[in-house]
Amino acid sequence: MNKTHHLKLPVSERDVRALTVGDTVYLHGEIVMAAGLLTHQRIIEYLEAGKPLPVDLKGGAMLHIAGYSREVDGRCEVLYINPTTSTRFNDYMPRIITGLGLRLTGGKGGLDARSVQAMREAGCAYLSFLGGGSTLLTKSLKEVISVNWTDLIFHYRLVKVRVEELGPATVGIDAHGGSLYESITRDAQARVPDILAGLGPRRSTASHSKG
């Protein structure tokens, strides 16, 4: 039976490994939003050069969440947040997960088998957020902590914010190698022969009618 977890960040490896695919998660604390290819490329550059990032992600959550902001009295105000598609970052995430010691990542659409393996090794889980759930997710946003890499447009910056009850999110990939995305793909592929067999008579009838 799936469980509901309220996690306070930073989170321990033990708590992450207690998560199971299908569980519901709400986050409390500081998260880092990273939503662009340029962002991920720069993170890799920092890792390869041995340079520390401007934010500490050890035991933390780097989420594929984008935001829209404005400046008010010289301060950044994030007006809304929304998850973005994680599969765009498949080539970068395995190195980022292991190199930064991430405990949580997430967004929409999941990650591929290379990231699943990296998460299993590092003790990291992937959280799937509701696409189009901007109103609900934005309610959890309480404070902008820091905005880094300001030479980039806001969408590509590393932005740390404080959230309360960010969610609901579903554990799409757990730290044991379980993946909702892989199981859904397997189930869909397994049904293809039956679907084609069911269409067989119709396809045959349609072919004769054309003849």
Image (spheres, rainbow, N blue to C red):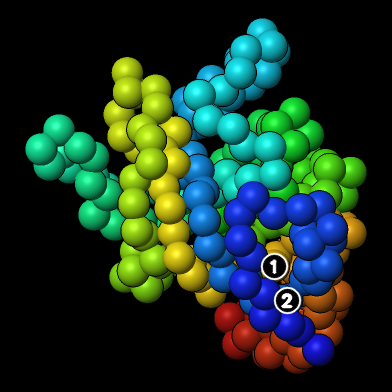
In this picture, is 121 found above or below 169?
above
Residue type at mark 2 is Gly
Q: Amino acid at mark 1?
A: Val
| Element type at mark 1 | strand
Q: Residue at x 69, y 11 (%)?
A: 50
Q: Position of residue 127 (x, y in %)?
A: 63, 61
Label 2 environment density (alpha carbons within 10 Å; few <14, some 14–19, many ≥20):
many
Which disc number belongs to residue 84? none
x then y, percent, for residue 18: 83, 67
Q: Residue at x 37, y 73 (%)?
A: 136
Q: Nearer the viewer, residue 185 or 146?
A: 146
Instruction: Give coordinates of residue 42: x percent, y percent.
Output: 54, 20
Q: Nearer the viewer, residue 202 or 49?
A: 49
Q: Earlier in the sequence, mark 1 or mark 2?
A: 2
Q: Which residue is mark 1?
A: 171
Name which quarter of the figure residue 46 lies in.
top right
Residue 117 visible? The answer is no
Locate the C terminus and report the quarter of the image it occupies: bottom right
Which element is circle 2 on?
A: loop
Please tell me how crowded label 1 is: few (under 14), some (14-19), or many (20+) other residues with Cα within 10 Å.
many
Task: From the image, tell me which residue sits under label 2.
Answer: 22
Residue sitting farthest toward the left:
73
Query: Is residue 8 depicted above or below 151 in this figure?
Result: below
